[in-house]
């Protein structure tokens, strides 16, 4: 849909209509450099994962270009802020693919362009298909509503979880940027009932997150119709309380907490966008937050595979050998070796380092042959993973997974060992030892 807006309304070459979406190319959490046109992944310290840099659909052939521009793989914070476009939500994955495909087409056909304008045009087209004219249903939502079975699954297990929480006295609220007509169509289909409003104590649509968290916009009561129940209101009426079964639009965080009385640390807010959903509730109110990251299903399947475990163990063996070999170079016996023997030893070390790099590429390819894992680079956490952990207290591939736990369940995170701390045996290993005794 974005491709067609570019061609039909923004004068892009008609030949782009032949482009087909390749869902296997991009991953969430990569960055687009609006000055160079490169796509790549950053780690938690703003270092570029050099084996992920792509210009168009091709890996960057001359990595010296990175050193010429930045002096190395590290990007200064001001460069990240002013020149990088972070592709952090699910909708940015097809945007990244389209960026790469158009750059590849322009490159192949020697068409001059500026990477920043291309990113801005794709973002504008994406905003249009999401929001439309702001009054009627957006093109994207209209397409989904007209073919809802192609895009959404029924979710009886999610409805069951929400109803169970409500029976236990929990208060539930829905906060979404989508408009009422779309939300009504989607939830009626997913829950297989038109009475989805009864599940929530408060339902808020057209919220305009992330601006909602700092906004001063008042709430409005939305005119709705569900069976024999109809809400008829004037759109300018003041809203100072929430009534059961009604739907509201707009509003802001301060008014929401004032009206509901929801205490900050008693709230768990679950969403799928790190910045639009999770950052501001954490910072502004200290809410507990949960991130929905559907890629976890794939990441877990890879991380638990025999092939992955074999590669990791092999890399660890290589690294241990390299460490011991480097220590050997400080021994008296090594110092007394002939120059040729020292050179042979150095070449063996370099061969070990090359083998380590080769195996790291194999690990990357298990996740995605272009950008690797969503959550990590070779050694460090990815920038996306760092933000998820900074702004969410838990994360899961599907919110329905919470149904496997009682509502008063406490999640205890694993202790993280820092680089200078001694390695503590895993508690499962300790329990095995105790049971054997």
Image (spheres, grey):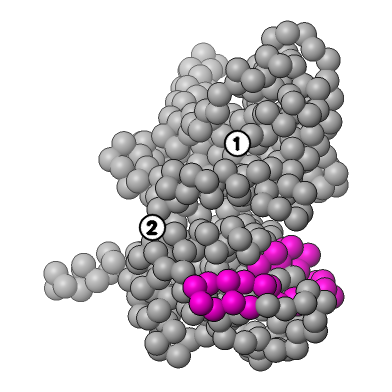
Start and end of the magenta stretch?
A: 203-231
Q: Which residue is mark 2?
A: 154
Apparent side of residue 18 relative to residue 189 in the rendered image (left or right): right
Looking at the picture, tell me which residue is in the foreground, 328 or 390: 390
Q: Which residue is mark 1?
A: 94
Q: Residue at x 66, y 67 (%)?
A: 205
Apparent side of residue 370 relative to residue 383 in the rendered image (left or right): left
Q: Number of callouts in the render?
A: 2
Q: Position of residue 28 (x, y in %)?
A: 58, 44
Residue 428 visible from this viewpoint: yes
Of helix, strand and loop, which one carries label 1?
helix
Q: Residues within 10 Å of mark 2 (few under 14, many from 20)?
A: some
Quarter of the image that includes the C terminus: bottom left
Please check the rendered image and state whether residue 55 is part of the magenta-colored stretch, yes or no. no
**Where 400 falls versus 67 (above or below)?**
below
Q: Position of residue 26 (x, y in %)?
A: 56, 34
Q: Quadrant of residue 236?
A: bottom right
Of helix, strand and loop, which one carries label 2?
loop
Q: Residue at x 67, y 19 (%)?
A: 16
Quarter of the image that includes the N terminus: top right
Please check the rendered image and state whether residue 218 is part of the magenta-colored stretch, yes or no. yes
Q: Quadrant of residue 163?
A: bottom left
Determine which of the numbered discs, if any, sits on residue 192 in the image. Answer: none
């Amino acid at each position: 849909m974005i491709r067609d807006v570019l061609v039909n309304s923004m004068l892009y070459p008609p030949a782009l209509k032949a482009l087909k979406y390749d869902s296997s190319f991009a991953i969430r959490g990569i960055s687009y450099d609006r000055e160079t046109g490169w796509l790549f992944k950053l780690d938690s310290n703003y270092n570029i994962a050099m084996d992920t840099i792509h210009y168009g659909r091709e890996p960057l052939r001359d990595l010296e270009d990175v050193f010429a521009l930045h002096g190395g793989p590290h990007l200064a914070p001001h460069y990240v802020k002013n020149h990088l476009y972070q592709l952090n939500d699910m909708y940015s994955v097809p945007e990244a693919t389209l960026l790469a495909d158009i750059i590849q087409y322009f490159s192949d056909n020697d068409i001059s362009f500026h990477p920043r304008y291309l990113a801005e045009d794709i973002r504008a087209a994406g905003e249009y298909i999401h929001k439309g004219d702001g009054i009627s249903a957006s093109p994207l939502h209209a397409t989904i509503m007209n073919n809802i079975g192609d895009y959404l699954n029924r979710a009886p297990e999610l409805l069951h979880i929400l109803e169970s929480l409500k029976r236990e006295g929990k208060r539930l609220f829905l906060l979404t940027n989508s408009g009422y007509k779309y939300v009504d169509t989607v939830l009626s289909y997913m829950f297989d009932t038109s009475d989805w409003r009864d599940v929530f104590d408060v339902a808020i649509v057209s919220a305009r997150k992330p601006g909602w968290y700092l906004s001063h916009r008042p709430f409005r009561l939305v005119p709705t119709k569900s069976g024999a129940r109809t809400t008829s209101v004037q759109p300018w009426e003041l809203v100072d309380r929430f009534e059961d079964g009604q739907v509201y639009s707009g509003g802001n965080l301060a008014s929401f907490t004032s009206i509901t009385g929801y205490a900050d640390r008693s709230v768990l807010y679950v969403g799928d966008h790190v910045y639009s959903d999770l950052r501001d509730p954490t910072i502004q109110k200290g809410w507990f937050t949960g991130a929905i990251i559907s890629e976890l299903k794939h990441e877990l399947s890879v991380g638990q595979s025999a092939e992955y475990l074999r590669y990791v163990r092999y890399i660890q063996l290589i690294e241990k050998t390299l460490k011991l070999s480097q220590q050997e170079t400080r021994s008296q016996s090594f110092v007394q070796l002939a120059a040729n023997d020292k050179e042979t030893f150095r070449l063996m070390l370099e061969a070990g380092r090359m083998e380590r790099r080769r195996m790291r590429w194999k690990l990357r390819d298990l996740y995605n042959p272009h950008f690797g894992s969503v959550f990590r680079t070779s050694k460090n956490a990815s920038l996306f993973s760092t933000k998820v952990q900074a702004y969410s207290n838990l994360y899961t591939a599907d919110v329905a997974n919470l149904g496997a736990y009682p509502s008063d369940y406490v999640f205890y995170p694993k202790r993280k060992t820092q680089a200078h701390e001694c390695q503590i045996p895993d508690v499962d290993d300790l329990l095995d030892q105790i049971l054997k005794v």
